[in-house]
């Protein structure tokens, strides 16, 4: 097949979940199909990133979003019922260029990642289209509203309602639909949501085969895009809620917070040499390798957390919340530890650091669990079947 793929962000480097999912799906699809990539960007793209994607895409088209239009189109949504996100990512001149590419290429299929991109092709009816919701974005907004107050709470609630209505409405413009987990599928408010196919993420073999000799200098590691609100909240929870409990009995506890674009709230957490904030690292596997445990007290956000897959594939016992585990589906005390309160997280950390046998069991079970369940080749094979209407 010739497949036109439309992304709201350029899929490299892999510092965000949507980019990681897109990158691996593109790479797998390109083994059997011609992939014509159209990606939007509001940031400069390095030539080395373009070269990486060029190595497997048949065509690679990048469309720079104009800053004045970003602001204007976002503000215009005040007078519509569409989510502000669709306004942010939509520009008429880019739609015309994408339309011309589609007319020239004459693809067999169009694949859109996230509802942010759907306005560009929703009115094309003569070519089969698949929408990857990926996450239930509306639910993520509602959860952010729950932890905020005042004007922020109101804005998140408004965007949550608009997203929920749009997720429902846009369903009927596409032939096929995918999403990352059963949990997120349940949050889509459409009478035919059972038709949505769950396409999980995979895990790169590079994580399970990593063999550098790196000292495990940190008791706790947490990774992610450190400008993304759920990750910022998580980092703060680790340092402000769990860490004070740990140092009562383990005063030398060390924490590594690693990931791109750390928010000022994250950098402010490095109050002493026992708490390190790295910012961008060239190879995130090096950060995982420095840790003894992976702690992810995620209370907001949606979707399947790639950071958990990566940590577990690296052999780090993972401690996380029921919310994050709803998509992961690990078995408590077998392949991961599930906790809800700061005291429970701290107790799990202390036990694993003190109990070598349990550490080794969770390390081995977690690695086996993610390697058996999450595979990019199998995941994209399911995606191909969806596209072909099987």
Image (spheres, rainbow, N blue to C red):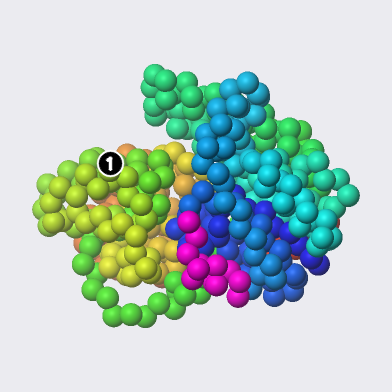
The reply to whether residue 87 is visible in this rendering is yes
Residue 124 picture location, percent across and down? 82, 45
The reply to whether residue 177 is visible in this rendering is no
> In percent of the image, x 69 and y 41: which residue is there?
92
- Majority SS type along the magenta span: helix
> In percent of the image, x 58 and y 22: which residue is there?
78
Magenta segment: does it hold 205?
no
Q: Quadrant of the C terminus?
A: bottom right
Classify mark 1: residues with Cα within 10 Å, few (<14), some (14-19) or many (20+). Answer: some
Secondary-structure class at tag 1: helix
Residue 268 image-quadrant placement? top left
Q: How many marks?
A: 1
> In percent of the image, x 61 and y 71: which residue is there?
54
Residue 77 picture location, percent across and down? 60, 27
- For the view shown, which residue lies furthest in the right direction? 126
| Front residue of 314 and 145 | 145
Relative placement, left or right, of 143 versus 150 is right
Residue 353 picture location, percent across and down? 23, 61
Q: Quadrant of the N terminus?
A: bottom right
Residue 314 image-quadrant placement? bottom left
Q: Which residue is mark 1?
A: 265
Relative placement, left or right, of 317 versus 248 is right
- Specify the segment rendered in magenta: 44-55
Residue 323 picture location, percent across and down? 47, 42
Relative placement, left or right, of 34 versus 68 is right
Task: State whether residue 357 is above or below residue 261.
Answer: below
| Front residue of 183 and 210 | 210
Relative placement, left or right, of 210 versus 263 is right
> In percent of the image, x 52 and y 24: which residue is there?
157
Task: State whether residue 35 is above or below residue 320.
Answer: below
| Front residue of 18 and 46 | 46
Residue 37 image-quadrant placement? bottom right
């Amino acid at each position: 097949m010739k497949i036109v793929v439309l992304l709201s962000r350029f899929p490299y480097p892999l510092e965000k979940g949507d980019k990681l999912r897109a990158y691996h799906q593109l790479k797998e699809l390109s083994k059997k199909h011609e992939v014509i990539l159209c990606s939007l960007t509001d940031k400069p793209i390095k030539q080395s990133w373009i070269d990486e994607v060029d190595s497997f895409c048949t065509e690679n088209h990048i469309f720079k979003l104009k800053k004045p239009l970003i602001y204007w189109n976002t503000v215009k949504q005040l007078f519509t019922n569409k989510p502000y996100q669709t306004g942010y990512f939509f520009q008429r001149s880019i739609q015309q260029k994408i339309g011309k590419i589609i007319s020239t290429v004459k693809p067999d299929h169009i694949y859109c990642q996230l509802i942010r991109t759907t306005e560009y092709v929703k009115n094309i009816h003569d070519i089969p289209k698949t929408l990857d919701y990926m996450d239930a974005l509306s639910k993520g907004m509602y959860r952010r509203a729950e932890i905020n107050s005042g004007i922020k709470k109101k804005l998140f609630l408004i965007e949550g309602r608009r997203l929920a209505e749009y997720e429902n409405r846009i369903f009927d413009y596409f032939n096929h639909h995918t999403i990352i987990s059963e949990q997120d599928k349940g949050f889509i408010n459409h009478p035919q949501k059972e038709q949505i196919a769950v396409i999980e993420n995979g895990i790169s073999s590079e994580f399970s085969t990593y063999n550098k000799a790196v000292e495990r200098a940190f008791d706790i590691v947490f990774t992610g895009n450190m400008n993304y609100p759920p990750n910022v909240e998580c980092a703060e929870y680790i340092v402000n809620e769990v860490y004070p409990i740990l140092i009562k009995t383990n005063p030398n506890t060390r924490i590594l917070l690693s990931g791109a674009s750390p928010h000022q709230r994250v950098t402010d957490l490095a109050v002493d040499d026992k708490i390190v904030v790295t910012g961008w690292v060239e190879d995130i596997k090096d950060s995982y390798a420095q840790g003894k445990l992976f702690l992810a007290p995620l209370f907001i956000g949606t979707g399947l957390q790639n950071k958990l897959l990566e940590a577990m594939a690296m052999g780090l016992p993972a401690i996380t919340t029921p919310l994050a585990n709803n998509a992961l589906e690990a078995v408590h005390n077998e392949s991961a530890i599930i906790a809800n309160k700061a005291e429970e997280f701290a107790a799990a950390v202390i036990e694993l650091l003190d109990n070598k046998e349990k550490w080794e069991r969770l390390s081995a079970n977690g690695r086996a669990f993610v390697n058996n369940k999450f595979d990019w080749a199998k995941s994209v094979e399911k995606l191909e079947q969806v596209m072909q209407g099987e």
